[in-house]
């Protein structure tokens, strides 16, 4: 294709046990998918329909180093199970949804909490609190063909080796299959889409120089330094 400005490379994430990478099309995120986190954010943990927001594909960070973003004094971590889709579609039934999953990764939904809170209070879009440069550090993707579809297991985050977040995948209000089914009602999901599935309780602030280490049992680990 001839382009009027130079085209860029498609953002891509390493795949565990492979030299080939996973190309990223779009990043969807689920809000408040663990009851304890919904409570800490001042909400109600009832099984309300999940809500979604996005980050740009280019927000992925795969080299373990994230720059502290501008326009915030309250950068916070949210460790999450990430789903990588190999296929897509509209109105995907929950019973068929996992057939579309290529694999799973550990991700960080990094958040400018002060910006998010200010926008939320004004009833405005969260975008600049969530969808900024380097806001989506992610581990290598573990193929479902190798690890299966984890339904339970610890999801944890430490900052400078101190425990911060701890939960279990079994405590998701909306499991992965339900998230895919619901999201595919709003948009036609596509191969290459990533879905961040929400964070357990214990979100908190990070500073320049901190090292974040996330893990999801049976999926993998992620280590990120805030530069
Ligand atoms: Mn999140």
Image: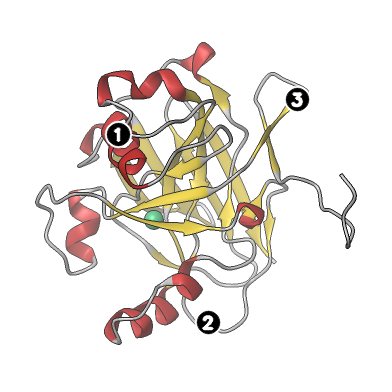
Disc nearest the viewer among 3 and 2: 3
Q: Is residue 216 above or below residue 223?
A: above
Residue at numbered disc 1: 181
Which one is earlier in the sequence, the residue at label 1 or at label 2? 2
| Disc marking residue 65 | none
Q: Is the CB–ligand 1 distance for label 1 below 8 Å? A: no
Tell me if label 3 and label 2 are in contact, CB under 8 Å. no
Disc nearest the viewer among 1 and 2: 1
Q: Would residue 75 be visible to someone looking at this image?
A: no
Query: Of residues 91 and 83, which is closer to you in this image?
Result: 91
Mark 1 falls on what kind of element?
helix
Query: Of residues 148 and 36, which is closer to you in this image?
Result: 148
Total residue callouts = 3
Q: Position of residue 97 (x, y in %)?
A: 35, 24
Q: Is residue 183 above or below residue 7?
A: above
Q: Where ligand 1 lies, by quadrant?
A: bottom left
Mark 3 falls on what kind of element?
loop
Q: Position of residue 72 (x, y in %)?
A: 53, 82
Instruction: Please name the residue shown 60% across and 39% down the image.
Output: 139
Q: If the image is split into quadrants, where does the N terminus sit?
A: top right
Visual colour scheme: secondary structure
Query: Of residues 47 and 123, which is closer to you in this image?
Result: 123
Residue at numbered disc 3: 20
Q: Is residue 68 left or right of residue 153?
A: right
- Label 1 packing within 10 angstroms: few (<14), some (14-19), many (20+): many
């Amino acid at each position: 294709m001839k382009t009027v400005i130079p085209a860029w490379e498609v953002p891509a994430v390493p795949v565990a046990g492979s030299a080939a990478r996973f190309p990223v099309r779009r990043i969807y995120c689920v809000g408040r998918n663990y009851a304890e986190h919904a409570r800490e954010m001042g909400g109600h943990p009832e099984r309300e329909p999940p809500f979604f927001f996005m980050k740009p594909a280019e927000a992925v960070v795969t080299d373990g180093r994230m720059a502290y973003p501008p326009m915030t004094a309250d950068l916070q971590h949210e460790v999450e199970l990430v789903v990588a889709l190999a296929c897509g579609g509209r109105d995907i039934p929950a019973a068929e949804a996992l057939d579309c999953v290529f694999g799973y990764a550990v991700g960080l939904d990094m958040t400018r909490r002060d910006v998010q809170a200010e926008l939320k209070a004004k009833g405005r879009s969260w975008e600049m609190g969530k969808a900024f440069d380097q806001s989506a550090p992610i581990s290598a993707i573990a193929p479902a063909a190798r690890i299966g579809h984890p339904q339970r297991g610890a999801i944890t985050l430490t900052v400078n080796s101190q425990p911060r977040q701890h939960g279990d995948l079994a405590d998701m209000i909306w499991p992965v299959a339900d998230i895919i089914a619901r999201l595919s009602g709003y948009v036609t999901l596509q191969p290459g889409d990533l879905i961040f599935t929400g964070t357990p309780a214990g979100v908190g602030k990070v500073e320049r120089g901190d090292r974040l280490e996330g893990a999801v049992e049976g999926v993998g680990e992620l280590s990120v330094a805030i530069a």
